[in-house]
Image: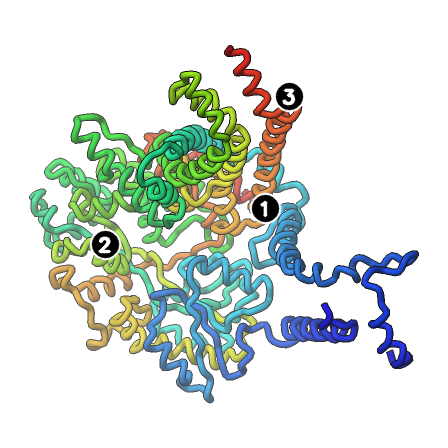
Amino acid sequence: MTATNPAVSTTTPAIKPTTAPAGRPRNPLKRFWPQYVSVAPFYILFLVFGLFPLVFSIYLSFTNWDGMGKRTFVGLAQYRYLITDARFWNAVGNTFIIWFMSTIPMLFFALIIAFLLHQNIRFKGFYRVAYFIPNVTSMVAMAIVFGSVFSNSFGLINSALQAIGAAQIPWLSSPWGIKFTIAMMVIWRWTGYNAILYLAGLQAIPTELYESARVDGAGTWSIFGRITVPMLRPVILFTVITSTIGGLSLFTEPQVLLGNSGGPGEAGMTIVLYQYNQAFTQFDFGYGSAIAWALFIIAAIFAIINWRLVSERDTDGNTKRRIRRRREVAR
Amino acid sequence: MAGFSRRSLLAGAAGLGALATAGALSGCGSTTSISSDPKELVLWYWDRSADPKLLAIAAKEIPGTNGMRLRADLVGGTFDTKLRTSLAGNAYIPDLTYINSNVSLYFPNESMFLDLNDLGAQQYKDLYFDWKWQLGVTPTNRFCFFPLDTGPTGFYYRKDVFDKAQIESDPDAVSEQIKTWDGYIELGQKLKKNVGSFMDINAGVIFGQFINASPERYFNKAGKLLYMEPNSAIKQAWDTAVKAIKAGVTGNQQNSTDQNAAWTSGKTAGHIEAVWWAQILTDTAPDTKGKWRLASQPVRPGNSGGSFVCLPHTCKDPEAAFKLITWMNNPQNQAQSYNNMQLFPSALDSFKGDLMKGNNSFFAGQDTQTFFLKSAESVPTAFISTFETQAQYFGTEIINVESAGKNPDQAWEDAVNQTNKTLRKRGIDV
């Protein structure tokens, strides 16, 4: 720096072109550094809190570690154990059953609610907010309410069943009762959220379609089945994908309702709850990491299936064209 | 853009670099303690585990030290995870930390904690219940975990429900009738037949409290597996719980909503639990005030819960920290902690004179302090192994027997096999 001629350095900025001189392309890093600096915080945080734990958990899954002592390398032993671990497969089964029991009715209800909200009704804004409230309610409060509603001998539902002379159902101690209760919590929490997504999708459908259908004499339900649902296909796919991710990583609902053990018979033990149980109550971080990567593989398989579903739509034409075709056929 | 010249950029980068270097140096080079103030010791504890009045005194000056002060950090939630994280990272480690009754989890990493015998702990040994002291001794005979409160157990029961069932309901009479587990189950059958109430919420409690009152548990100090031996304490606890299930004296109430409702309504008229449960009962079932009494549980009382305090190896002034421990846990201060926080003392002399002032109105004036003192005096000395967390399947399987009607022999076999499998995975020869 000391060797630089001061006269040159003071004059150069005045004549410096804003773009790089021809023949010597400037390093983009030098040219766009303010932009790089402004996006850097995200990448730094991602490196520290995203990528590092990700890579570290791969490494951990090949070790035995109790969280504070020595880490011993065990190769694929954790994965070998995983494959023969009946408790892990029970958790996989539970996760899929609860996912099925919750996602299908949830998306169905959400669609109906969105369709009704889209009609010309009074207090629309109120209903839209009301349907969103379950999603922002504290999970712990929810678990207490659901615990009271479904508890075996003193729950509201069983009291009602008793009042009408029906047999009581052991909601929180039988395998299907537990899964049903968790599914109900998921449905309660996420139906409104998905309904709002559907509502946004509905508002994007051109009103002329509805008007012409009305003119053609279509009723509410045939409009719903023949226009609304097909036009909403991309949004439906989106909600299916997000519900799949949510369903596979189901944790809070069973944890707050049943504790870290997953309830009697581990009937409410989901994959993520099992991972948490192994890593943070048994302090077996190696095995916990192996479970996490097994879940990653399962989720990846579903991502591929979803992707195939989406790309199928692109190859056989967009939805609008399909509707036109369908209407022609109907004519 | 115009404000930035190459020179200012270089200066800025140099500044950032210097900052990062300084940060890195302070991270690895100097102290691993969470506080760099040489006069300040940091203690990690959780809510309701320490008396705030004592902490406030030590915050000004730890008695007997040369101007050392205490900073007590209330650590909430997953305490063990947070402590293990700082120990694993060798950074931000507190100078002293409380550890709950799961202290044996730390035995494999005992080198991370100081042996308090090196600081003269032996001379305090006789002040505390021996069984509690022994729980803080590691398998290699290092004394790392100093006694805080204890959890002697007893049989809580609803006198009004027993009266209705025409059972002699005086505490002495109840203790006499349930001297053995057979007596307990017999009384339970009478209770069930006469008023339809249960002796306890579920069979898991009987299984667990039987073990808590046993000198022998899952493993011995040498690491030998005991549960598979014929007539082991675990098998006896299992058989007793199964017998109680078959006799129908437990309520199969597996979730807390049902349990609390059952105690309030009298559907379940009893519970075997430690001294600290009285506070929970007072909070969750205030309407039952005056209806509860305490009787001795079958065979002998046990210990359930109770915490410890220890010094991580990075403690900046072990002598001052040990002074704090012995001061906070002297008999007078433990008695005061009982009066303020219901922390039941581990120091024998806390019970002398009238240091302890309990409010026994919830138990219609029954002297619960004396009851639990007697109970604490009879708790057997036992060894809790690190690997007991791997033996949780026994508890899981007893629930399956009670709530799903699983065959008890099959359930026992499954519990043994699953425990063995998990232990082998952890590198234990089974």
Badge 2: residue crowd in 10 Å (few <14, some 14–19, many ≥20): some
Q: Mark 1 vs mark 2: same chain?
A: no
Name the mark nearer the viewer: 3 or 1: 3
* Rendering coords of residue B385 (x, y %): 46, 54
The chain ID associated with circle 3 is A
Quadrant assignment for the N terminus of chain A? bottom right
Callout 3 amino acid: Asp
Which residue matches tag 3? A316
- Left or right of residue A83: residue B153: left
From mark 3 to mark 1, how far is it between C-alphas? 41 Å
Residue at x 63% of width, y 76% of height: B30
What element does badge 3 sit on? loop
From mark 1 to mark 2, how far is it between C-alphas? 39 Å
- Left or right of residue B54: residue A160: left
Q: Is residue B378 above or below residue A6?
A: above
- Left or right of residue B304: residue A328: right
Residue A179 visible (yes or no): no
Badge 1: residue crowd in 10 Å (few <14, some 14–19, many ≥20): many
Which residue matches tag 2? B284
Protein image colouring: rainbow
* Rendering coords of residue B107 (x, y %): 51, 59
Q: Is residue A100 above or below residue B145?
A: above
Determine the image quadrant of residue B44: bottom left
Say which of A53 and A116 sits in front.
A116
Say which of B190 and A232 sits in front.
A232
Residue at x 45% of width, y 25% of height: A210
Q: Check contact, mark 3 vs mark 2: CB within 8 A.
A: no
Residue at x 47% of width, y 29% of height: A207
Which residue matches tag 1? A289
Callout 1 amino acid: Ser
